Image (cartoon, grey):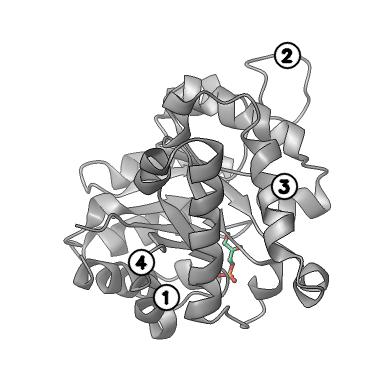
Amino acid sequence: MKKFLIAGNWKMHKTTAEAVSFAEEIKAKNLENAEDVAVLAPFTQLSELGKALAGSGIKFGAQNVHFEPSGAFTGEISVPMLEEIGVDYCIVGHSERREYFGETDKTVNLKLKALIAAGITPILCVGESLEVREAQGEQTFVASQLIADFEAMPISDVAKVVIAYEPIWAIGTGKTATPDQAEEMCAFIRGVMGGMYSNEVADQMLILYGGSMKPSNAADLLSKPDINGGLIGGASLKADDLAAIADAANALK
Ligand code: 13P
């Protein structure tokens, strides 16, 4: 049976009150595949969101973390702080963090290792810009991200990372990669991981697509063999839309 993860990245949206009412709404839908669904929320909402989702099977997590366990890092949040709240997932290396907040492959690598050590599943984002795609450099670019992001990671930890292929040109633009373009890159990513580690490990990995995924295009994307789910921005803000995408994945199991 194909494994799926349908993860909503709320980015900088929703207050805690709005997050809790979203949780009530999605819980009421009694999703058959609740365990395959996660919401990634801003830090201030995590505690209440975790309580509101308790018992539903739906997972939750953060959108970023610092790699040091503690220290003089004003404004940052550590892995032990996330652990205390009981988060399941944490996004690492989203293109918005790489572009606006100086995230590098080096910090991504340190964050992946710190999260894995704490038993929190990282969702690692990779993906090329429009400029790189137009120069047909997407495979070289994404392979170089993967090589740097997984540097010195032992093979026993590799399948603990979820990878999300998010072409920057498809994020928030309404311009979705075609199912064939998304599949080509997710299969390519699996191949790179197979080459770096082993095909057995690569086959166990969850590889998601992200970029303007919505109820109307989810089934076509999710039916592709190397796409194990979605990292969904805009369409994850409404419980109805996230539930519809989760249903599309469930129908393909
Ligand atoms: P959109 O679904 O809004 O395009 O965002 C995708 C994304 O960046 C998820 O992390």
Image coords of residue 140 (percent x, y): 73, 57
For residue 71, which numbered disc appears in the image? 2
Tell me where residue 239 sits by quadrant.
bottom left
Going by the numbered disc 3, the residue's amino acid type is: Ser
- Respond yes or no on whether mark 3 lies under 8 Å from ligand 1: no
Most extreme residue toward the bottom, as rendered? 216
The residue under the point 50% across, 79% down is 180
Badge 1 crowding class, 10 Å Cα cut-off, few under 14, some 14 to 19, many 20 or more, is: many
- In space, the residues marked 1 and 3 are separated at their CA atoms by 25 Å
Q: Residues within 10 Å of mark 3 (few under 14, many from 20)?
A: some
At horizontal 38% and vertical 68% (from top left) the residue drawn is: 242
Instruction: Please state the horizontal and vertical placement of residue 103, each as a whole percent of the image.
Output: 77, 42
89 and 167: which one is in front?
167
Horizontal side of 68 relative to 154 (left or right) equals right
Q: Which mark is residue 144?
A: 3
What residue is rendered at 74% in x and 56% in y? Answer: 141
Residue highlighted by disc 4: 225
> Is there CB contact under 8 Å for labels 2 and 4?
no
Which residue type does callout 4 highlight? Pro
Q: Give the distance between the C-alpha atoms of the residues marked 4 and 1, in whole angstroms.
A: 9 Å
Which is more foreground, mark 1 or mark 2? 1
